[in-house]
Image: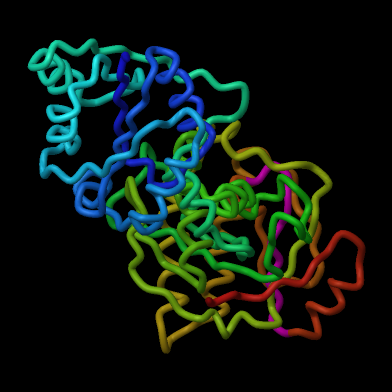
Amino acid sequence: MKKVFVSGCYDIIHGGHVEFFKQAKALGDYLIVCFAGDQSLKMHKNRKSSLPVSHKKSLLESLSMVDEVVVGDDPIRGLDFKSHFLLLKPDVLAVTEDDRYESEKRALCAEIGAEYVVLPKELDYDKTSTTEILSQIKAPSELPLRVDFAGGWLDVPKYARENAWIVNCAISPMVSLSDWPYEKGGGLGGSAAFAILNGKDGVKEELKLGVGWQDPAVIRESGLCVWKSGAEPRLEFKTSGEFLKGKMALLWTGESHVTYEKTDLERDYDSIIQAGKLAREAVLPGNEDFRKLCQAVQLSCEVQYGEGMKTLPSFEETAKKYCGGGWGGYALYLFKNEVDRNQFLSMEYTISIEPFLQ
């Protein structure tokens, strides 16, 4: 009888594991599966087990291709199965092509004359992992989007500046995967929210696109936030944004907004830095100054016009700017009171928003 041995965390059994077990069983007659015990899982993944050991053992034993299940508890990184392996003396140790402990496992195989076999990860459906599954389980069901007042682009790592700030605010209405009350491509951080709702790391996903981290940062933090410019989110302070209630609205420009296409355009970074500093002063806790914040927003708008964006229509607002990187999407309008805002909201393609604090 040819015995095949496999090992892994197998914290949440998914299709990739099942396919691997099928491939491994095809190498012999008897398949032994070793999964990481609680202490081993903590050592490997630095997290608690998602299921009790007895449950995982029962699930693995129920699979038709699995003949024996053991628990790896040896305090050896990458070789928590060593004692079982030496005791059972399998003929084959099967591993996946991304195994991180090849040299250690090959040496272990040499001790008993076992064959070391690498199996490719081939699936006819989307790959996943325990980490991704756990992230999806933990993902929120709804999130705010965001508007940015000043300092935009200073959250892109290559454009970060010392002693500079990004000021933004999470907003309602909220969004969910089944209810999205905004136009797509609106410049409100929708791509970041979509990633988070799907259990992904919003900051990593945005940085992959070559844009900045401000959208996922404020969406997860909520509130009216002041961030230090840099390669990663560093929150200086936040408030509820209460003084902005009844004063914010959006206008849909009719054109979608795609930030990453505009990242490398030339722009007035000195004015962007100045706008960020002005906005930070305007939202200091206990000293909120709506007029000064509007000055910062208007300065941000002038930078956008300097890039060549179309002039936004006026509606008795105190300040306005394109959301995010501009060139389409939504435009943010600030009004001195709710009466003026309501007049604006009587027109088509407008929407009322409010600051959101979790």
Q: Is residue 94 left or right of residue 223?
A: left
Displayed quadrant of residue 233: bottom left
The residue shown at (29%, 32%) is 7
**288 up-or-down from 46: above or below:** below
Judging from the image, the colouring scheme is rainbow
The N terminus lies in quadrant: top left
* Residue reaching furthest to the left: 111
Displayed quadrant of residue 36: top left
Q: Position of residue 234 (x, y in %)?
A: 33, 59
**157 up-or-down from 253: above or below:** above
**39 up-or-down from 90: above or below:** below
Between 232 and 22, the one nearer to me in the picture: 22
Q: Position of residue 148 (x, y in %)?
A: 56, 60
The residue shown at (71%, 71%) is 353
Between 259 and 291, the one nearer to me in the picture: 259
The residue shown at (80%, 80%) is 340
The residue shown at (42%, 15%) is 120
- The stretch drawn in magenta includes residue 61: no
Asked whether the viewer can see residue 266, the reply is no
**175 up-or-down from 285: above or below:** above
Magenta span: 326-337
